[in-house]
Every structure is written in structure tokens, then in C-alpha cells.
Image (cartoon, helix red, strand yellow):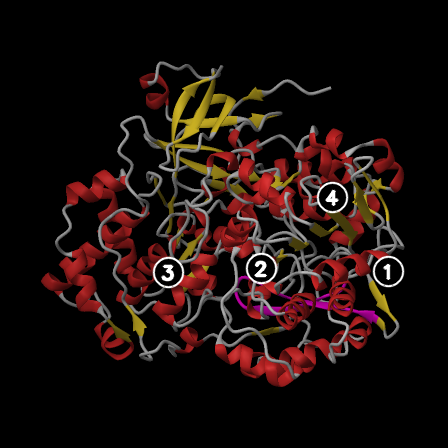
């Protein structure tokens, strides 16, 4: 029986006893108190396994417990005692399962054996692994062109499996690599190289200890990367100013209680995190960044010594063009676009100017706009003005989501591979890989809609639930000849399927991998370019599960029967895979198998940390984004900018519960957070049911009804609601022009009365 929704403000600090209670509760709900607690002691520790949740780095393991609340939830749901067997699929047709919520599907437990969809009965039925691989190989070999297949990768896929997946797909003949980074931090990968020569962050964990100022922009740290809160707490205690810029005042960035701090827990204490909160309008970050740069240019012209001219003259190019863009801006326009006063922008600019070492951390609040890639270049411009690259405590820090999303890109999951990579791949494996660019996520869905794609293979994740334009995307996925989902748990992607469909259950991050060569481990690259080993400690949920690496190799053997690559050897010996990674990436992965023996792994080379810029001109570049808009303007007086967000009991598309503790929402996900003045202006009252419909130019009607209006501290003209429930409002072609990342943080909508 569904529980009644309720809404009540959360008045406590984030973390603390609330986090401790939530951790204990989820272990109990998944019936893994003993097993889960034991596994938690091995998570993020040398010789143990890496958290299957976020990509934030691990410290040097000085604490007994090196995990956060959401990491514990991820492990508990992975280690759950609940199982989905063939009897479950006998009892539930796919049509019946489609009626269930994402939360219900997640709660059913671990998948235990490979299954094939039977159209005659509308049920999944068992299939042997051999027959499953034969079916995949048959579909792939019968395609008219290799470009008719789309190969998706989730960020949880470890380096070894992702590397071989990339090799297999390129030997098959395509660069169609839609992956989860396309939907989140692709603007980092595509926007930063032109600026600093690398599509990654430039900081390491130790830089938090040396920073004199920290800026956190468009990132809900306490929910999406909670282990970072330890670094923010320590910085705050040292008196480091922490400037938070966000449309919503997220609880953890206001005050936080460390669950591992015995004294703080005993006294119900907490630490203030943000020294200043900047309540920006959705899409207003560009105006703030340009306002700060305007102040820097003006003060340097008057006083001198504000801009680091030694750094600028030695290492950069393009400052004159940037100045010409910034100086003419009017403060009235900056205030209007940002929703922030000149006085507050001056205050935070002064914090930046006084600091000799500044880190700027950001999340999808910056990336998911129509000009997200170019917006990140403005963040880099600000850092370049004071030489905040290549010195302790300074740099740019994209706070990425899934645990190995950055690593997957490093080892080849890229629809736009470099010539150097392709040349090395050809030499290492003795075949000529395709050179033309393939599809990212938006392009892959568009290909399905046009009937140009016939096969989809998903290496983890919940692709169909994550992508935009839900109704059209569901229809497109259902038109395919074959869909394959390599998964640990049941999700919507198994129910929106092709004419043929397979569910292939996989060993999880926390589980052991044994082959003919003995126990194996995998490797993970975190958001700060550290590569570490990960070895599971739990027995697999079923004897019928297979590791990702074996699944990739078996698919390759079925689809490429004439391949001379020793796929069977890679199934048993992961050292052989790492040797090949080192061969293809000698500059960063040389002596891989030797270096990975270090308990804390090793750091991949990062040019900007040494003030080396791998750009065409060998310089870091100031890049101009004219104007103050990060999204196309909309000529509609009733328009509101919708940002889709995640709840605290959620990771990506995985819903752990229907609660959002820090925002005070319980037993409900169909809500919309609005400013009280926007509510009143539209003749609404808090608690009322409304609809939202998209404002677009493509003549497609997109509307969601029965959303509960909640008053919230969000700027006028800005509203928020949960992802993926509000994905139907996001048009497929509404994305960043450079990277293709859906602009999910700024969807133009208007209120419609619920029917």
C-alpha cells in the first residue's frame, strides 16, 4: 500500500545522525546488516573494492570507515539478499512490469540468470549463455552496416572491460559510442581541451589542503558526491572561504555534521560550510562569471597587480579578445541575467582576488545548458586571469558522477577518437579501426527514431530512462531488432525493448571474480585522474553471473569469428588486458601492471598541473562566449526555466526510496519546487496539482500533469523537479551545441492547470 505524501522542512544539519540512521535502515531493508557492514569496511580501502557510486577520490584511508551514506546505499542495494529468478518472470509479464515504478523495480533484487524476451507470451524466459551470445553475434553479423548498431557504456564499467569493449566495437567497424558522460560531463571533455589542452579536471585531493578559496558552482555535494563534504568541512574549519553558487540552497552546503566525528555526533554539532551563498537564477552563472572578470579587469587597470601578468604573458593567448568582450558589459544587464546584485558579485570577486590559490568545483548545473561547453571555458578564463593552474591548491575540478565515467573515456569509450589513439590501436591489435566519428547519445537516439539503428547493446546503466524526450525515445527503442542490457538489477531499460531482447546478469563491483588464472581485480579512474585497483569481497549473487570482461570477450568472439585478437586469453587474465592498455596509451599507462600494485594506485599525467598545454598553439587559451545567455532566449512572458534534479535517496536513475530528506519531501517524486511569488502570480497555492508543458518550436506537445506545487527557496523564474520523471519535457534537440549534452538544467516550460 502506497504511503501518503508529506512535505515538511528538514531543519537539521546534513549528515550526522540522519545519515547514520539512513545507512542502518538501508542495510536492514536489504537484509544485509552483517554482510553489508563487513563489506563497507573494505570499500575504498587498499585491497578492497571501489565504491560503486560517485567518482570522488579516496583519501589515504586514515579512517576506519571510508564511505558515505549514499555509498552505503549503493552497496546495500548491490549486496541485497533479494533475487529475481525465472519464477519472477513467469509470474510477471513485461506489460505488467511496465506499470510498476522505478523504485519498485529496483527493490526486486539482483538478476540471477540470462533471460530472453518471448513475444508470444510477453514474458522473459531463460536462455543459456551460449545461446545468448550466439543470438547477439547473429544480429550483429546480419546488419547491412556496422553503423546500424549502438553500443552504450555506463560509468560503472571498469577500465579493463571498457577498453576491450572499445576494441571490439572498433574491430566490428563503428565509433558509435553513446555513453553516460554524454548526458552529464561531456561539456568538460569537449569544452576544456581548447582552453587548457585536456578534458579533465586539474586538481588532486591534496589541493583542498592548500586552497585559499573554494568556489562550488551548480553542484549538490551532499547528495551527489558526499565524500567531498569531508574536504569542505576541513577547509571551513581552517577558515577557507567557500563560495556556493546555486539556484537551490542545498542543505549540506549550508551546514554539515560528520558522521565519523565522534565529538560532533555526541554534541549534535555541525560545521558551517558556505561562507557566502549566491542564489543565482537558472542560467545566470555566465553573468556572474563575467561580472567577476569585469571587476578584475577594472581593478587591474586602476591599481595594477590584480591579474597575474607573468603567468598570462608566458602561458596564455587571447586575453585582449576576452577583455573586449567583458569590459563593455553593463551592470544592469549582469544583474538582470544573474538575479544577483552588483554588491554581492563584488564581494565574491574580492574573495577570488585576495586568494593566491583558488579551486573552482562544478557539476551539472553548469554543464547541462545549450552552451555548457563554452560556459566551462569562462570558468577556465576566470582561473587563468590569476594563474590558478599548476600550483598547489588551485585549478578546475569537475565533480563527476559515476565511479568510472572518466576512466571509460580515457581508455577508448569515445565517439570522436583521436588519431593518436586509433594509430596505436591499429598497431597493438593489427586491424584498421574506423576513422569517421560515430554517435553520441542524442545522435544514437535520433538514429533509432529514423530507423537507421537496429541493434542496441547497453553495458550497464538504464539508458532508456536517462535519455530525453521519453515518449519518442521509448517508441524508438521499441522499434529495434535487438536490445541487450548487461545489468545487475531490473530497470525500465529491460521493459522498453526491441523485437529480440536479452538481459545478461553481471558480477557487481563488490563481488569476487575468479577465472582459470585465479582471482582477478579491475581498475577505476576517479574524477581526479587517480587509477586504483578494485577487488570484490562478496560471493557473486548467483553462480550464473559473468564478469563484464568475459561478456565483452564472448560477444566479440560471436560477432567477429575471424578476429585474431586473443579474446579467450583476456577472459582469464586481466594482466594481459592492462598490458594492452599500456601499449595503446604509453604516455599515461606505461608499466600499468607494476604501478597498480601500489596500495593507492597512481596518478595519470595531467599537463596543466605542470603548466604544459597540449593545445594547437601550445598555450592556455582565453575563449570568448559573447553575451550573457547560456540558452536560447524564449519569447514567452509565462516561461519558467525548469532544472531537473536528483533526490537525496537516488543515484542517477536508481531510486532508493521516494523520499528526499534534505528538501523535506516524503513518499512523492511528482513535485515541482517554485518561488512563492511565481506561485501567487499564477493564481496557485502550495500543495495544488498542476501540469507543466514544454515551450518548443518543433510542434510536439510535451506535458506532464499531476505535479504537486511546493514552495521553495528558488529564484523567481526558476523551478525544479525530479529526474528522470520530468525527462518527457526535455526535447531531444535541446542540447549543448558543442557536446550534445541534453540541456536538462534549463528546460523552458509553462504552467498548465492539471486536468
Task: Please give the range of residues in magenta.
Answer: 519-535
Q: Earlier in the sequence, mark 1 or mark 4?
A: 4
Residue at coordinates 82% horizontally, 39% vertically from top-left?
Answer: 31
Residue at coordinates 60% horizontally, 41% vertically from top-left?
Answer: 465
Mark 1 secondary-structure assignment:
helix
Q: Earlier in the sequence, mark 1 or mark 3?
A: 1
Mark 3 secondary-structure assignment:
loop
Q: Position of residue 532 (x, y in %)?
A: 65, 69
Distance of label 2 from label 4 (alpha carbons): 20 Å
Residue named by callout 3: 212
Mark 4 secondary-structure assignment:
helix
Judge whether residue 524 is colored magenta: yes
Select label 1 or label 2 by which is in front: 1
Q: Position of residue 439 (x, y in %)?
A: 52, 59
Judge whether residue 155 is colored magenta: no
Residue named by callout 2: 405
Tell me whether circle 1 and circle 2 mark residues in contact (CB < 8 Å). Answer: no
Distance of label 2 from label 3 (alpha carbons): 29 Å
Which residue is more in the foreground, 715 or 688?
Answer: 688
Distance of label 1 from label 3 (alpha carbons): 58 Å
Q: Position of residue 225 (x, y in %)?
A: 55, 50
Select label 2 or label 4 by which is in front: 2
Distance of label 1 from label 4 (alpha carbons): 29 Å
Amino acid at each position: 500500500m502506497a504511503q501518503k505524501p508529506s512535505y515538511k522542512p528538514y531543519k537539521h544539519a546534513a549528515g550526522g545522525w540522519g545519515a547514520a540512521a539512513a545507512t542502518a535502515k538501508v542495510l536492514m531493508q536489504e537484509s544485509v546488516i552483517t554482510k553489508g557492514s563487513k563489506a563497507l569496511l573494505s570499500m575504498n580501502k587498499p585491497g578492497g573494492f571501489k565504491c560503486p557510486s560517485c567518482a570522488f577520490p579516496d583519501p589515504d584511508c586514515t579512517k576506519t570507515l571510508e564511505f558515505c551514506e549514499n555509498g552505503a546505499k549503493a552497496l546495500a542495494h548491490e549486496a541485497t539478499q533479494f533475487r529475481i529468478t525465472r519464477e519472477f518472470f513467469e509470474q510477471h509479464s513485461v506489460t505488467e512490469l511496465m506499470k510498476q515504478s522505478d523504485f519498485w523495480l529496483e527493490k526486486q533484487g539482483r538478476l540471477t540468470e540470462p533471460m530472453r524476451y518471448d513475444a508470444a507470451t510477453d514474458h522473459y524466459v531463460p536462455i543459456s549463455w551460449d545461446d545468448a551470445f550466439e543470438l547477439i553475434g547473429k544480429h550483429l553479423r546480419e546488419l547491412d552496416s556496422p553503423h546500424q548498431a549502438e553500443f552504450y557504456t555506463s560509468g560503472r564499467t571498469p577500465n579493463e572491460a571498457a577498453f576491450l569493449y572499445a576494441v571490439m566495437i572498433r574491430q566490428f567497424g563503428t565509433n558509435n559510442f553513446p555513453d553516460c558522460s554524454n548526458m552529464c560531463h561531456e561539456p568538460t571533455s569537449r569544452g576544456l581541451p581548447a582552453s587548457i589542452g585536456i578534458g579533465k579536471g586539474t586538481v588532486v585531493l591534496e589541493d583542498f589542503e592548500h586552497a585559499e578559496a573554494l568556489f562550488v558552482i551548480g553542484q549538490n555535494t551532499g547528495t551527489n558526491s558526499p565524500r567531498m563534504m569531508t574536504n569542505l568541512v576541513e577547509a571551513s574549519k581552517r577558515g577557507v572561504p567557500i563560495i556556493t553558487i546555486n539556484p537551490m540552497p542545498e542543505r549540506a552546503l549550508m551546514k554539515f555534521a560528520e558522521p565519523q566525528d565522534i565529538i560532533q555526533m555526541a554534541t549534535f554539532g555541525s560545521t558551517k560550510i558556505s561562507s557566502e551563498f549566491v542564489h543565482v537564477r537558472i542560467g545566470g552563472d555566465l553573468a556572474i562569471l563575467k561580472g567577476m572578470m569585469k571587476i578584475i579587469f577594472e581593478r587591474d587597470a586602476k591599481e595594477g597587480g590584480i591579474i597575474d601578468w607573468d603567468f598570462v604573458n608566458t602561458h596564455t593567448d587571447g586575453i585582449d579578445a576576452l577583455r573586449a568582450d567583458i569590459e563593455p558589459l553593463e551592470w544592469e544587464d549582469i544583474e538582470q541575467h544573474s538575479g544577483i546584485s552588483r554588491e554581492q558579485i563584488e564581494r565574491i570577486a574580492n574573495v577570488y582576488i585576495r586568494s593566491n590559490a583558488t579551486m573552482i568545483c562544478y557539476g551539472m548545473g553548469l554543464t547541462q545548458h545549450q552552451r555548457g561547453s563554452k560556459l566551462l571555458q569562462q570558468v577556465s578564463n576566470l582561473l587563468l586571469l590569476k594563474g590558478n593552474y599548476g600550483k598547489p591548491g588551485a585549478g578546475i575540478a569537475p565533480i563527476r558522477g559515476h565511479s568510472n565515467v572518466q576512466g571509460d573515456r580515457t581508455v577508448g569509450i569515445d565517439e570522436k577518437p583521436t588519431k593518436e589513439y586509433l594509430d596505436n590501436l591499429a598497431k597493438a591489435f593489427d586491424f584498421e579501426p574506423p576513422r569517421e566519428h560515430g554517435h553520441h547519445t542524442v545522435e544514437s537516439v535520433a538514429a533509432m527514431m529514423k530507423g537507421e539503428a537496429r541493434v542496441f547493446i547497453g553495458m550497464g546503466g538504464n539508458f532508456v530512462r536517462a535519455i530525453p524526450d521519453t515518449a519518442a525515445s521509448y517508441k524508438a527503442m521499441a522499434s529495434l531488432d535487438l536490445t541487450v542490457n548487461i545489468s545487475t538489477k531490473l530497470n525500465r531499460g529491460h521493459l522498453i525493448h526491441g523485437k529480440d531482447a536479452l538481459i545478461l546478469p553481471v558480477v557487481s563491483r563488490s563481488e569476487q571474480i575468479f577465472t582459470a588464472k585465479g582471482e582477478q581485480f579491475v581498475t577505476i579512474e576517479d574524477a581526479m585522474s587517480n587509477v586504483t585497483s578494485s577487488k570484490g569481497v562478496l560471493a557473486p549473487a548467483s553462480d550464473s553471473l559473468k564478469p563484464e570482461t568475459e561478456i565483452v570477450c564472448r560477444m566479440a568472439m560471436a560477432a567477429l569469428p575471424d578476429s585474431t585478437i586473443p579474446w579467450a586469453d583476456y577472459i582469464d587474465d586481466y594482466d594481459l588486458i592492462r598490458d594492452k592498455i599500456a601499449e595503446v596509451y604509453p604516455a599515461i599507462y606505461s608499466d600499468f601492471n607494476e604501478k597498480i600494485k601500489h596500495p593507492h594506485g597512481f596518478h595519470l599525467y595531467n599537463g596543466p598541473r605542470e603548466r604544459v598545454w597540449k593545445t594547437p598553439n601550445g598555450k592556455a587559451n582565453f575563449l570568448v562566449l559573447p553575451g550573457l545567455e547560456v540558452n536560447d532566449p524564449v519569447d514567452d512572458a509565462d516561461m519558467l526555466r525548469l532544472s531537473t534534479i536528483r533526490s537525496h535517496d537516488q543515484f542517477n536513475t536508481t531510486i532508493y526510496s521516494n523520499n528526499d530528506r534534505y528538501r523535506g519531501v516524503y513518499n512523492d517524486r511528482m513535485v515541482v519546487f517554485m518561488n512563492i511569488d511565481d506561485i501567487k502570480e499564477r493564481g496557485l497555492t502550495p500543495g495544488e496539482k498542476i501540469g507543466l508543458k514544454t515551450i518548443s518550436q518543433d510542434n510536439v506537445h510535451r506535458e506532464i500533469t499531476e505535479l504537486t506545487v511546493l514552495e521553495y527557496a528558488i529564484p523567481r523564474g526558476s523551478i525544479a523537479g525530479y529526474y528522470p520523471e520530468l525527462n518527457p519535457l526535455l526535447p531531444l534537440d535541446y542540447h549543448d551545441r558543442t557536446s550534445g549534452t541534453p540541456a536538462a538544467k534549463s528546460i523552458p516550460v509553462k504552467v498548465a492547470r492539471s486536468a
